[in-house]
Image (cartoon, helix red, strand yellow):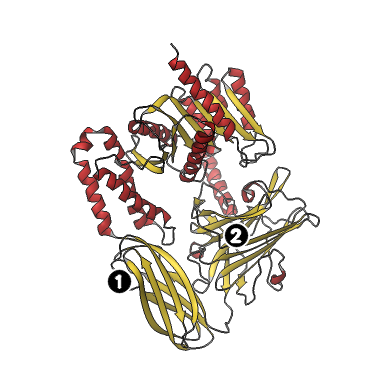
């Protein structure tokens, strides 16, 4: 009987889980949504005068698909259109109050506009998410995520945005244009369907409400690299004259790969005698011209042009394509850039690397040997990029890696460690003792580093959803300024990637930080009594956690907007529990938190500070009035505190 009861219970649980999953996925697109090409000029001024007659779409669903009733608190509509060059959107929101803190698209009023590849249905891992809002009365536009990568650094200067809030009427309007050159590979002439979602956020007195075009609970999550949206059909108008869109088939190639340009021409009539013309400029290639005559018919035409074979060297190439009509007039022009990797060149660098590993210097010089992963990791990055990267991913990274391969190879050729020049920011790597993989971190070594004098180490932990590179650049700038203006002691700065963007410095992610510290100690003369750990947000939690778990390793921790526990879906220590065991250690803490932080509420910092007081650990705490998760700057106070802390240690060791 007990076995039967257990079977019934298990069956009931399985049935309930299946039912809940079906309910969660029960929302489906019930209508054909269409966006029509416009022949009018859209002026981006926020007034919406040019949108008469263009259909409105209600933004009125919760993240679970429930209907939101219109109200004066939040009623949102959107209109979309396009021409051959741009996608246009106009959003109107009825809202009784407006709040625009820093990164308002996430923490205040504003919206996310997501475009996704519909080939996977309403959910896709190929997408763009734009963040739109106001910060200090200035319109802000940013690509916050592409294909699961937060803040990919894509240039959006060619986007136009106007935001007009009218607090008296309780209405705010947004108007924007996005060039299709940003939304690669989407071209309405080439793909007549695309997914779109709009997630509007309304913040009122600390409470934040959402309205969505299509329900997506994970619209801004770091757990999943997929986003959801409604599938729209793009309806091209019958043109009065031929209209053209262009796309190259990739942004990166091997030197011996075929490189193809696609022209989509929508024409009201048959045409002949038109000319495809291209100009190519790059390493070893100077203004190579290509001409090809073509014809096309009435309607939509897809034409393909292979670029002529060249002796392509490694580097970035600029391609300019023009379409000339039968009368010799230029009817279309567009520029593109792509990266070419010459396999032979890369193989030559690899051969030099392998030869250096066989040499006497590698066997006898620990610093030289431990520097070699800095070069090896770049070979791995380049190979993975060329073999696995999507065709339209940005090329800045691989261009930088190849330049760095050249620099580091020159260094080992001269019998020197594979280091970047002093005063610059580089990315190093170590061979992990955990699993043998190469793990990277960013590093800044001051220009006046002296091998004979031990130097302090500043360890910076990045926040969630981003890698360490941009954070390292900012920290290096702050440290350099503080040295000039406040005369703080010189220090090396490292910023570990820690095996991912959102691992919260738990498990192997936290262990990787310690391994990075040990690796840099093998390369430079680090003053082991002066190692500082710092973190922002998720990194703040990491700084709390690692400093308390390794109190003999760190002298102090600097924590900005730091969480005291990881998200519920991760298992990790609560900082208050760790502080219970910390009485008597020699750590020092400097904590800064915004009083209005709506990502990590200030109560977390207050609890931690109260516990520090109870157990008698030295600390400084600044609670910034009217500040949110970001948007404050207390680095002068922090560096003055660090200066006294480091100099106090020097006075102690020099006293008789």
Farthest right residue in view: 168
Q: Which mark is residue 309?
A: 1
Tell how many labels.
Answer: 2
Residue 357: x %, y % from top left:
22, 41
Q: Quadrant of residue 88?
A: bottom right
Pick the front one: 489 or 144: 489
Query: Which residue is drawn at the image coordinates 42% and 82% (left, top)?
Result: 275
Q: Quadrant of residue 314?
A: bottom left
Query: Which residue is drawn at the image coordinates 51% and 74% (left, top)?
Result: 189
Residue 148: x %, y % from top left:
49, 52
Query: Which residue is drawn at the image coordinates 36% and 75% (left, top)?
Result: 289
Q: Few, some or many C-alpha atoms within 10 Å of disc 2 (few <14, some 14-19, many ≥20)?
A: many
The secondary structure type at the circle numbered 1 is loop
Pick the front one: 174 or 409: 409
Q: Is residue 116 left or right of residue 203?
A: left
Q: Few, some or many C-alpha atoms within 10 Å of disc 1 (few <14, some 14-19, many ≥20)?
A: few
Whether residue 570 is visible, yes or no, is: no
Pick the front one: 293 or 488: 488
Whether residue 624 is visible, yes or no, is: yes
Query: Which residue is drawn at the image coordinates 56% and 38% (left, top)?
Result: 537
Say which residue label 2 marks: 197
């Amino acid at each position: 009987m007990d076995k039967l009861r257990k079977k019934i219970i298990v069956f009931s649980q399985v049935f309930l889980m299946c039912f809940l999953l079906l309910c969660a996925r029960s929302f489906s697109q019930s209508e054909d949504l269409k966006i029509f090409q416009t022949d009018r000029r859209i002026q981006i001024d926020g007034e919406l005068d040019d949108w008469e007659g263009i259909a409105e779409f209600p933004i009125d669903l919760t993240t679970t698909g429930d209907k939101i009733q219109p109200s004066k608190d939040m009623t949102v509509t959107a209109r979309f259109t396009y021409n051959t060059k741009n996608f246009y959107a106009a959003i109107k929101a009825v809202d009784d109050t407006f709040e625009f803190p820093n990164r308002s698209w996430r923490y205040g009023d504003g919206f996310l506009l997501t475009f996704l590849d519909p080939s996977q249905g309403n959910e896709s891992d190929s997408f763009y998410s734009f963040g739109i809002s106001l910060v200090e009365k200035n319109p802000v536009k940013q690509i916050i995520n592409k294909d699961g990568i937060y803040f990919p650094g894509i240039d959006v200067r060619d986007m136009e945005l106007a935001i007009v809030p009218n607090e008296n009427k309780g209405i705010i309007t947004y108007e924007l244009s996005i060039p299709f050159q940003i939304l690669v590979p989407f071209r309405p002439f080439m793909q007549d369907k695309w997914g779109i979602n709009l997630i509007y956020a309304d913040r009122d007195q600390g409470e934040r409400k959402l309205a969505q075009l299509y329900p997506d609970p994970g619209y801004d999550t770091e757990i999943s690299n997929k986003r959801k949206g409604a599938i729209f059909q793009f309806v091209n108008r019958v043109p009065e004259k031929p209209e053209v869109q262009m796309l190259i088939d990739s942004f990166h190639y091997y030197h011996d790969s075929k490189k193809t340009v696609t022209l989509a021409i929508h024409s009201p009539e048959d045409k002949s005698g038109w000319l495809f013309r291209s100009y190519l400029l790059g390493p070893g290639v100077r203004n190579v011209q290509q001409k090809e005559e073509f014809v096309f018919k009435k309607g939509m035409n897809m034409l393909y042009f292979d670029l002529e074979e060249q002796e392509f060297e490694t580097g970035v190439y600029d391609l300019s394509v023009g379409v000339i009509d039968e009368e010799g007039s230029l009817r279309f022009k567009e520029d593109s850039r792509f990266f070419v990797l010459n396999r032979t060149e890369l193989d030559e660098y690899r051969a030099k690397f392998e030869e250096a590993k066989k040499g006497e210097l590698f066997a006898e010089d620990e610093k030289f040997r431990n520097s070699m992963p800095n070069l090896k990791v770049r070979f791995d990055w380049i190979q993975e990029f060329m073999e696995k990267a999507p065709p339209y991913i940005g090329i800045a990274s691989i261009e930088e890696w190849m330049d760095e391969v050249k620099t580091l190879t020159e260094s080992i050729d001269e019998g020197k460690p594979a280091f970047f020049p002093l005063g610059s920011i580089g990315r190093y790597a170590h061979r992990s003792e955990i699993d043998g993989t190469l793990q990277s971190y960013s590093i800044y070594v001051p220009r006046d580093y002296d091998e004979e004098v031990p130097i302090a180490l500043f360890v910076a932990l990045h926040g969630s959803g981003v890698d360490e590179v941009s954070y390292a650049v900012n920290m290096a700038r702050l440290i350099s300024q503080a040295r000039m203006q406040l005369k703080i002691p010189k220090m090396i700065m490292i910023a570990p990637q820690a095996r991912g963007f959102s691992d919260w410095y738990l498990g192997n992610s936290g262990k990787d930080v310690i391994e990075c510290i040990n690796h840099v100690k093998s390369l430079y003369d680090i003053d082991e009594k002066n190692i500082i750990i710092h973190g922002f947000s998720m990194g703040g939690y990491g700084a709390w956690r690692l400093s308390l778990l390794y109190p003999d390793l760190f002298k102090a921790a600097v924590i900005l907007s730091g969480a005291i526990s990881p998200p519920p879906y991760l298992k990790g220590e609560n900082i208050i529990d760790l502080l219970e065991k910390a009485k008597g250690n020699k750590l020092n803490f400097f904590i800064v938190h915004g009083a209005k932080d709506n990502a990590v509420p200030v109560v977390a910092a207050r609890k931690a500070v109260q516990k520090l007081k109870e157990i008698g650990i030295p600390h400084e705490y600044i609670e910034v009035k009217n500040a949110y998760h970001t948007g404050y700057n207390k680095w002068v106070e922090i560096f003055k505190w660090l200066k006294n802390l480091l100099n106090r240690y020097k006075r102690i060791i020099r006293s008789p």
